[in-house]
Amino acid sequence: MSTSPSLKIGTLDLSRLTEGNNSNQQLLNSNDNGSYGATTTGRDKRSGLNWIQLEQKFNNLITQFNSPQQGTFTGTSLTQKQEHMKQLELSLEAIIEVALSESSMILQEGDFKRATIGGLKALEYIQKLYGKDALQQVEAYFLLSKASQQLNQFKQAEEYLSIANWTCMKNKEKCPPNLRAELHQHFGLLYVQQGKVNEAIENMAASVYYLALEHGTHDVITSFAYFNLGNVFVSMQGKSEKGVSFMKKVVDIWYDQLSSIILVGKPQTNDNEDGSLEVSTRQARIQFKNSVKDLDEDKVGDAEKMLEHILRTDSEHLGENHVETGKVYVVNGFFKLFLGDFAKAREYLEKAREIFVYVLGENHQQTKEVNQVLENLDKRQ
């Protein structure tokens, strides 16, 4: 038998990680003065979720699901039995989703210990339904790793990710590129936090690879991985130029996507209250979201932060009056326009025009494009 580290990872003692039901009872049974914010009835004071009832419901359903007698109803057909089992499975999956969502919300609120306990409870549910080798448990391990990082428990965080990695390896044929990319991103961010730069770069690069495999190299989803990799290089002494080049790749991707939306020819005039630019943007927004399947509300927020961060980075490393800095202002302006924040869009675009006029001149194509969009903004007022 191989003695590779990956096999050792796969045989970690999970009882030490989950600490059994006693640990989870802290989430379910703590009183009003308890550290985990649940009442004596088990209801979470922040969200209203009753963890005890959730536990009872899950245990009842999983018992039915696993019972050899389940679905043996007098007079029912095999099809009806199968449908009943399917409904049980869907109900169990819904409970797991509630536990994961609640734990993720707790994590975002900064209660990392409670998020860990909730994540362990979700992991327990997943393993009871799908088994301990199931790919579905990877999401719970991601959550647990993030909570451990916030508690500065880096060894524990890495153990959770190592189990997730081993799970992906055991489900190699089923594990999609997006999930592999997310796994490497979590490893990369963990290593960044620990100052392990080389390991961070290796994992961030792997994240780029898997996202490019799924979405292509010139895609807004892949751009988030380019950004993470660029950020690592920017933080390294003597590597900032390489980091800025990765961020330029991000800007080019977003410019190509957004310019195809914003620069759609002459705007149509309407008799209604909506300006032509608003109508064009609303129509193009559908096209944009269809081409970027994963651009949900969270991704939009991430994109705003990412583009603003790149603007600060370019301003610092390239200077304010640089063509690339001007292009980042354009992309930020186009994105705000896409989101309907016209005031902020104008602010960014006017700054871009100022830079382009200074560096490229009034008659350059990039200056003209920005002028066109600003003129359209004027028409809608």
Image (cartoon, rainbow, N blue to C red):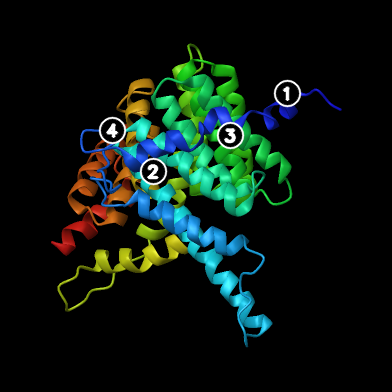
Circle nearer the viewer, 3 or 4: 3
Q: Earlier in the sequence, mark 1 or mark 3?
A: 1
Report which residue position mark 4 lands on: 358
Of label 3 and label 4, which has the lower sequence position?
3
**What residue is drawn where x is 21% and y is 53%?**
342
Q: Residues within 10 Å of mark 4 (few under 14, many from 20)?
A: some
Which of pointers 2 and 3 lies earlier in the amino acid sequence? Answer: 2
Looking at the rendered structure, the secondary structure element under dot 1 is helix
Residue 240 rendering spot, x and y as whole percentages? 47, 19
Q: Quadrant of residue 63?
A: bottom right
Other-residue count near label 1 (Cα within 10 Å), few / some / many at <14 / 14–19 / ≥20: few
**Contact between labelled residues 3 and 2, with CB atoms less than 8 Å apart:** no
Secondary structure category for the residue under label 2: helix
Residue 103's mark? 2
Which labelled disc corresponds to residue 184?
3
- The type of residue carrying mark 4 is Tyr
